[in-house]
Image (cartoon, rainbow, N blue to C red):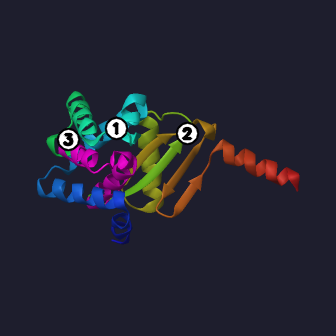
Amino acid sequence: MESTGGIQASLSGRYATALFELAKNSKQIDAVEASLGTVRQALAESADFTALTSNPAIPRDAAGRAVAAVAAMLGLDALTTKFLGVLAENRRLRDLPAIIRAYRALAAEHRGEVTAEVASAHALTDTQIADLKQALRQRVGRDVSVDLSVDPSLLGGLVVKIGSQMIDSSIKTRLNTLAHAMKG
């Protein structure tokens, strides 16, 4: 469980581990993971929510009330809602993306999966995601959960990180390699 030790080393990892342990003890791992996925999507889609979580000038009580309202609007489970309140109180809402990644890694490890961080130039379809999971499963010999993100600067292709291993098939990298080779 080397990866768990690595996760626990960071502050966001400690928060994620605490949330994971609470979720495990109350048999809500999947519900919390789904709620955190909803939070992650809200962060990606709402500049206002991102500003709320990253602006240190917002007083703790106001941030707490705001995240409680957002949690209710998003239909988050009670444990995740309470956790967001703790983050607001401790002024750690800015760490949400890292906490979510760490929690997902802990949940995947608990299920016996390995987590792959996948960046693509465009959003992947459900079929593409299923094909990618299958290809990664064949490569690593275990079930793989994917943590997807979109990075338009890649132009095309994928960048996949599994632990310390990286597979970069992006057009951006290929162009950079070609440009470097042409410089001689």
Classify 10 Å Cα crowding around label 2: few (below 14), some (14-19), many (20 and above): some
Residues under numbered marks 3 and 2 in contact, where contact means CB atoms less than 8 Å apart: no
Residue in front for this viewpoint, 13 or 85: 85
Q: Main secondary structure of the magenta part?
A: helix
* Residue 135 point in image, percent of width and height: 47, 51
Q: Residue 174, how many percent across, how many down?
A: 71, 47
Q: Position of residue 59 (x, y in %)?
A: 30, 39
* Residue 93 is inside the magenta segment: yes
The image quadrant where one finds the C terminus is bottom right
Q: Badge 3: few (under 14), some or many (20 or more) residues near its Cα, within 10 Å?
A: many
Contact, CB < 8 Å: mark 1 with mark 3?
no
Stretch of the chain drawn in magenta? 82-110
Left or right of 114? Residue 67 is left
Q: CA distance from mark 3 to mark 2?
A: 29 Å
Determine whether the residue tagged by mark 1 lies in a helix, strand or loop: loop
Mark number, residue 14: none
- Residue 16 is a magenta residue: no
- Which is closer to the viewer, label 3 or label 2? 3
The span from disc 1 to disc 2 (Cα, nearest Å) is 29 Å
Residue at mark 3: 81
Instruction: Point out the frontmost of discs 1 and 3.
Output: 1
Q: Along the horizontal axis of the image, is 169 left or right of 80?
A: right
Which element type, helix, strand or loop, lies under badge 3? helix
> Which is more N-terminal, label 3 or label 1?
1
Residue kind at label 1, given as amino acid type:
Ile
Up-down: is 118 above or below 123?
Answer: below
Residue beneath disc 2: 151
Q: Quadrant of residue 80?
A: top left
Name the amino acid, label 3.
Thr
Name the amino acid, label 2. Answer: Asp
Locate the N terminus by quadrant. Answer: bottom left
Residue 58: image tag = 1
